[in-house]
Amino acid sequence: MRCENAGATESSEDYLEAILVIRAERGFCRNADIAERLGVTRPSVTKALANLSSQSLVEVIDRDVRLARRGLEIAQTTFEKHEFFRRLLCDAGVDGRTASEEACRLEHCISDPSFRRLADHLAGLRGRTKMGE
């Protein structure tokens, strides 16, 4: 099943999220870092980055891959969804590796409005539970 949100493909979201995480960890991001993180070849990364660059989602400056404003927005939203579903699955007793793998699939298939409603709903339920209701 292929899922797309806001015109970004699942693959694009994975690349943008990887760039976000790598830059947060290292302060910079190279093609080789992306290839290693996603388990793909460097030529695949080069092709994907050319596509993302043509959509004005990333830019490569002196081999440093950077997120453009729209790419950053997509990456942050994708990462937020991933972490939400990973935590939810871990809280339900799913082991960390499986939770992360399944969160990666879930993050792509839920629309932003539905995700926001679900996150707000569960936050409200957790708030009531903590207050003893």
Image: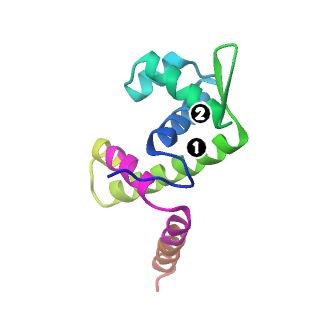
Residue visible at 55% across and 37% down in the picture: 16
129 sits left or right of 61 in the view: left
- State the image quarter where residue 92 is shown: bottom left
- Asked if residue 110 is among those painted magenta in the image, a careful observer would answer yes
Residue visible at 60% across and 47% down in the picture: 74
Residue 27: horizontal and vertical position, in percent? 65, 24
Q: Is residue 60 above or below residue 74?
A: above
Q: CA distance from mark 2 to mark 1?
A: 12 Å
Q: How many marks?
A: 2
Residue visible at 45% across and 45% down in the picture: 10
Q: Residue under circle 1?
A: 75
80 sits left or right of 88 in the view: right
Q: Taken as a whole, is the magenta stretch helix, strand or loop?
A: helix
Residue visible at 54% across and 47% down in the picture: 8
| 2 or 1: mark nearer the eye | 2
Residue 86: horizontal and vertical position, in percent? 40, 51
Residue 117: horizontal and vertical position, in percent? 53, 72
Q: Is residue 1 above or below residue 11?
A: below
> What amino acid is at disc 2?
Leu
Stretch of the chain drawn in magenta: 100-118
> What amino acid is at disc 1?
Ala
- State the image quarter where residue 63 is shown: top right
User: Mark 2 or mark 1, which has the lower sequence index?
Assistant: 2
Q: Secondary structure at mark 2?
A: helix
Residue 1: horizontal and vertical position, in percent? 32, 52
Q: Residue under circle 2?
A: 52
Colour scheme used in the picture? Answer: rainbow
Q: Secondary structure at mark 1?
A: helix
